[in-house]
Image: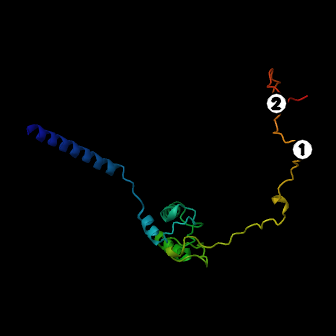
Amino acid sequence: MNLILSSVLTLGIIALVASMILYLCAKKFAVEEDPRIGQISAILPQANCGGCGFPGCPGFAAALVKAATEKGTTDGLSCPVGGAEVMDQVASILGSANAEAPAAPTTAPTTKSEGTKPAVPVKLKPMSTDPKPFVAPEIDFSGAKQNPVPEITCGPKPAILPAGWPTRG
């Protein structure tokens, strides 16, 4: 009984010391995030479409806050799904006027359930109507049917070749 009690007390003390070390490490190495990132992320449509060029809405929110703190403006950054309304709300949170926020496309979905990407017209090249590239080449099968044997074209001539192996003149 005495052995069990001492084992439990020893493990309890080890656990207490380990938990204090973990607590101190968590405090020392804590990563502080700007609270505006969470506020902006809550305003964004959460479509995570990548239309803004960033991996999801939280990444775009972090890029907006970084641009506002480093450059003082968010020009060139916009959410194609949320449009001008969302960018105006973002500008009010960041405390800067976002004058160059593009207007929302008329075909952009307004909610997550309608889709994730706006219908943007894509300029495609028309396919060629010339049938020549799609016609199989003509092959003459009238001669003797043999498997072609490659010629030795590089390096010195080997001293011994297999029987019947073609060589250059």
Q: Outermost residue, top direction?
A: 159
Seen from this angle, which residue lies furthest left? Answer: 1
Q: Quadrant of the N terminus?
A: top left
Q: Residue at x 25, y 47 (%)?
A: 19
Q: What SS does tag 1 mark?
A: loop
Q: Are marks 1 and 2 in contact (CB under 8 Å)?
A: no
Q: Nearer the viewer, residue 23 or 109?
A: 109
Q: Point out the tag, 1 or 2, that comes first from the N-terminus.
A: 1
The residue positioned 76% from the left and 66% from the top of the image is 125
Q: Position of residue 85 (x, y in %)?
A: 53, 77
> Would you name the residue on which mark 1 appears?
143
Label 2, secondary structure: give it. loop
Q: Is residue 24 left or right of residue 138?
A: left
Residue nearer the viewer, 98 or 60: 60
What amino acid is at disc 1?
Gly
Nearest the viewer among 126 and 68 is 126
In the figure, residue 105 lies in which quadrant? bottom right
Q: Which residue is mark 2?
A: 154
